[in-house]
């Protein structure tokens, strides 16, 4: 009898658990041999984003909401399928 109640408590706990999605600050675009690139070729609605904490990390983030320019600050979130631009950032 006690084991069934304990199982129900843990089952309810897992359902109510909230996943935390962290937001990171990034900069749009990469520079290659003096050229500036924003859009990822052959991937519609994807842009290059440099994560501010680690400048050497360049990611491809999904963007379907904003018109972005090179050097613009954005907030990105990591999901199971990759990165997504959440909003633009104005300091």
Image (spheres, grey):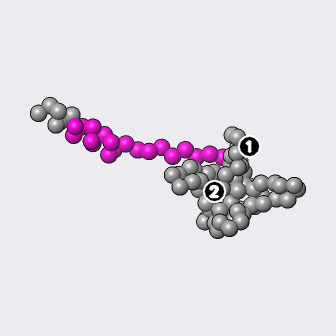
* Viewer-proximal residue among 89 and 8: 8
For this view, does 22 lie left or right of residue 2? right
Task: Give me the C-alpha separation between circle 1 and circle 2.
Answer: 15 Å
For this view, does 10 lie left or right of residue 85? left
* Among numbered discs 1 and 2, the one appearing first in the sequence: 1
Q: Is residue 14 above or below residue 44?
A: above
Q: Residue furthest left?
A: 1
Q: Is residue 62 above or below residue 25?
A: below
**Label 2 CA crowd tier, 10 Å (few <14, some 14–19, many 20+):** many
**Label 1 CA crowd tier, 10 Å (few <14, some 14–19, many 20+):** few
Q: Is residue 30 above or below residue 15?
A: below
Q: Do we see residue 26 in this rendering?
A: yes
The magenta region covers: 7-25
Residue 82 found in image quarter: bottom right
Say how many tags the image has.
2
The numbered disc on residue 74 is none
The numbered disc on residue 55 is 1
* Residue 24 is a magenta residue: yes
What residue is rendered at 51% in x and 52% in y?
A: 80
Q: Helix, strand, or loop for circle 1?
A: loop
Q: Do we see residue 86 in this rendering?
A: no
What residue is rendered at 58% in x and 46% in y?
A: 23
Q: Helix, strand, or loop for circle 2?
A: strand
Q: Which residue is mark 2?
A: 61
Q: Residue furthest right?
A: 34
Q: Residue furthest front?
A: 42
- Horizontal and vertical percent position of residue 45: 64, 66
């Amino acid at each position: 009898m006690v084991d069934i109640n304990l199982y129900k408590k843990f089952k309810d706990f897992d359902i109510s658990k909230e996943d935390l999605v962290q937001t990171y600050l990034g900069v749009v675009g990469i520079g290659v041999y003096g050229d500036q690139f924003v859009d990822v070729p052959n991937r519609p609605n994807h842009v290059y984003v440099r994560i501010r904490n680690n400048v050497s990390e360049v990611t491809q983030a999904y963007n379907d909401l904003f018109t972005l320019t090179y050097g613009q600050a954005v907030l990105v979130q990591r999901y199971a399928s990759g990165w997504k631009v959440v909003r633009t950032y104005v300091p």
